[in-house]
Image (tube, rainbow, N blue to C red):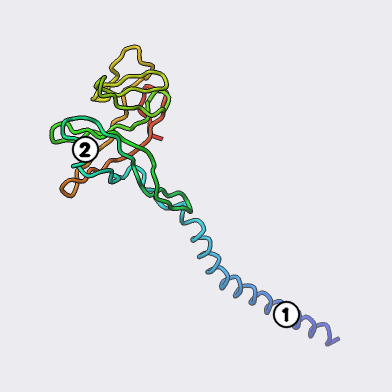
């Protein structure tokens, strides 16, 4: 009759050993698991640089007579896990007195690239014949574009550097909606 209580004590000890081993193993495994999970998810929580100013050109490269000039916008693009530097778009820069204006080169009608025409003293879109004045406003009432060229914020920094807050906007609508 003494055997059953002895077996019961052994079962209890075995259970306690296994439970304690499981608790210690879980506690020790939680730290590396949590660290790995944090590393995996950190790019998704990281803030992107959208809307930040990007260096586009030296002020001396922008003609001082008010003639627009096209410049590529080169920036570092970041998504969740990748980082690469490259061309993200283009802008027209133009001096107006001591200030600099910037327009996105994408036509607000269908997204085609507008070109500056010195003979017409304005911008024109080769896709659907939209026409814009030097100020970016629609210059031809028959223009299919619902709004003028998209103006961008410009900052002059460090004695002659032109920085632009580059953004793309949804084409085909009268509202200026950032993408």
Return the residue nearer the eye: 56 or 40. 56
| Quadrant in which residue 134 is drawn | top left
Q: Is residue 82 above or below residue 149?
A: below
Return the residue nearer the eye: 178 or 45. 178
Q: Residue at x 27, y 25 (%)?
A: 136
Q: Residue at x 25, y 20 (%)?
A: 119
Q: Residue at x 31, y 45 (%)?
A: 52
Return the residue nearer the eye: 24 or 107. 107
Q: Mark 2 = which residue? A: 62
- Most distant residue in the front direction: 119
Find residue 53 and report its horizontal and vertical position in percent.
29, 44
Mark 1 surroundings within 10 Å by alpha-carbon count, few (fewer than 14), some (14 through 19), many (20 or more): few
In the figure, is residue 123 to the left or right of 34? left
| Quadrant in which residue 100 is drawn | top left
Q: Is residue 111 above or below residue 5?
A: above
Q: Is residue 33 above or below residue 175?
A: below
In the figure, is residue 166 to the left or right of 24? left
Locate the N terminus and report the quarter of the image it occupies. bottom right
Find residue 84 and report its horizontal and vertical position in percent.
42, 51
Find residue 125 and report its horizontal and vertical position in percent.
37, 23
Mark 2 surroundings within 10 Å by alpha-carbon count, few (fewer than 14), some (14 through 19), many (20 or more): many
Q: Residue at x 53, y 64 (%)?
A: 36
Between disc 2 and disc 1, the foreground one is 2
* Mark 2 and mark 1: Cα distance apart in space: 82 Å
Whichever of labels 2 and 1 marks the residue nearer the N terminus, that label is: 1
Asked which secondary structure carries label 1, the reply is helix
Number of marks in the rendered image: 2
Return the residue nearer the eye: 60 or 105. 60
Asked which secondary structure carries label 2, the reply is loop
| Numbered circle sitting on residue 42 | none
| Numbered circle sitting on residue 14 | 1
């Amino acid at each position: 009759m003494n055997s059953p209580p002895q077996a019961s004590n052994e079962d209890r000890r075995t259970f306690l050993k296994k439970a304690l081993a499981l608790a210690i193993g879980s506690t020790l495994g939680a730290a590396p698991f949590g660290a790995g999970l944090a590393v995996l998810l950190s790019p998704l929580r990281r803030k992107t640089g959208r809307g930040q100013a990007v260096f586009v050109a030296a002020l001396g490269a922008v003609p001082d007579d008010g003639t627009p000039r096209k410049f590529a916008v080169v920036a570092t693009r970041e998504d969740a896990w990748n980082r690469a530097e490259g061309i993200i778009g283009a802008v027209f820069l133009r001096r107006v007195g001591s200030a600099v204006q910037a327009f996105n080169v994408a036509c607000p009608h269908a997204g085609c690239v507008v070109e500056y025409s010195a003979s017409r003293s304005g911008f024109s879109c080769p896709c659907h014949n939209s026409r814009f004045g030097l100020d970016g406003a629609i210059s031809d009432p028959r223009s299919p574009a619902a709004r003028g060229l998209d103006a961008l914020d410009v900052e002059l920094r460090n004695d002659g550097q032109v920085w632009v807050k580059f953004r793309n906007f949804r084409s085909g609508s009268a509202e200026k909606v950032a993408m």
